């Protein structure tokens, strides 16, 4: 069961990296942005931040799933992962504001980073004990003061991600002026949102295991 939960954390996080890179490759450039330094800089940051966010979450999932019980210092690393994700979430929102507005995709990504940071931070008291067996390594999670709020946030975010995945997938098939590149990017965003839903639920289940 523990291995299945680990897969439910790591595989969606890996999918998120692939989708973030793919969205940047398939998204059409913003109309009228040529020649405007600020717009071009915002577009470049807009392509970089999703990949950075996805890599952060993948690194945290790999460390939480495999490194916490094997490599000493998980407590400090978990706080570091959480802080880096919260900072990246703020950068995502700030980048959206510079570009003109904080869109649905930006909001979803920022919320995902914050929720994941909370899940990782709630995990660190148990992992700091570095118990030899996976079951006992997670046994102290129930005593975490953050646990109820973090679990509620994870479940709510998973529901929001599932809704986002379905609505984005439907939008990709609308014949509006999205174009083939935009349709591919929308499908990748849908897959990313679905993966975030699975990852959040797997992490929440890991905290209760």
Image: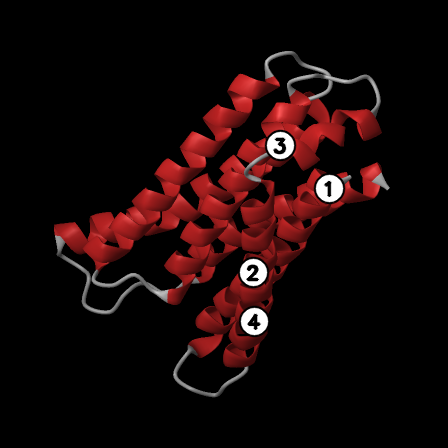
Element marked by disc 2: helix
The colour scheme is secondary structure
Q: Which residue is mark 1?
A: 208
Q: Which residue is mark 3?
A: 123
Q: Nearer the viewer, mark 1 or mark 4?
A: 1
Is residue 67 placed above or below 197 in the rendered structure? above
Q: Which residue is mark 2?
A: 156
Disc 1 to disc 3: CB gap under 8 Å: no
The CA distance from mark 4 to mark 2 is 11 Å
Give the crowd class for mark 2: few <14, some 14-19, many >=20 residues within 10 Å: some
Give the crowd class for mark 4: few <14, some 14-19, many >=20 residues within 10 Å: some
Q: Earlier in the sequence, mark 2 or mark 3?
A: 3
The quadrant of the image that shows the N terminus is: top right
The CA distance from mark 2 to mark 3 is 19 Å
Q: Nearer the viewer, mark 4 or mark 2?
A: 2
Disc 2 to disc 3: CB gap under 8 Å: no
Give the percent coordinates (x, y) of residue 202.
70, 48
Between 20 and 36, the residue placed more toward the observer is 20
Q: Which residue is mark 4?
A: 163
Element marked by disc 3: helix
Q: Earlier in the sequence, mark 1 or mark 3?
A: 3
The CA distance from mark 1 to mark 4 is 25 Å
| Residue under the image location 25 percent in, 63 percent down | 101
Is residue 175 placed above or below 179 in the rendered structure? below
């Amino acid at each position: 069961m523990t291995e299945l939960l680990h897969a439910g954390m790591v595989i969606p996080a890996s999918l998120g990296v692939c989708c973030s890179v793919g969205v940047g490759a398939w998204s059409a450039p913003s109309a009228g942005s040529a020649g405007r330094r600020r717009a071009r800089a915002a577009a470049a940051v807009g392509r970089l931040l999703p990949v950075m966010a996805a890599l952060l979450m993948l690194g945290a999932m790999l460390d939480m799933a495999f490194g916490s019980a094997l490599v000493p210092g998980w407590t400090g690393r978990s706080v570091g992962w959480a802080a880096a994700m919260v900072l990246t979430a703020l950068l995502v929102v700030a980048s959206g504001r510079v570009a003109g507005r904080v869109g649905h995709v930006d909001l979803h990504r920022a919320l995902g980073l914050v929720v994941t940071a909370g899940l990782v931070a709630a995990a660190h008291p148990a992992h700091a004990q570095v118990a030899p067996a996976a079951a006992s390594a997670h046994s102290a999670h129930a005593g975490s003061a953050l646990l109820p709020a973090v679990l509620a946030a994870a479940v709510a975010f998973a529901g929001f991600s599932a809704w986002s995945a379905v609505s984005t997938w439907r939008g990709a098939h609308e014949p509006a002026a999205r174009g083939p590149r935009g349709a591919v990017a929308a499908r990748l965003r849908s897959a990313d949102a679905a993966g975030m839903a699975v990852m959040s639920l797997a992490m929440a289940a890991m905290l209760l295991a």
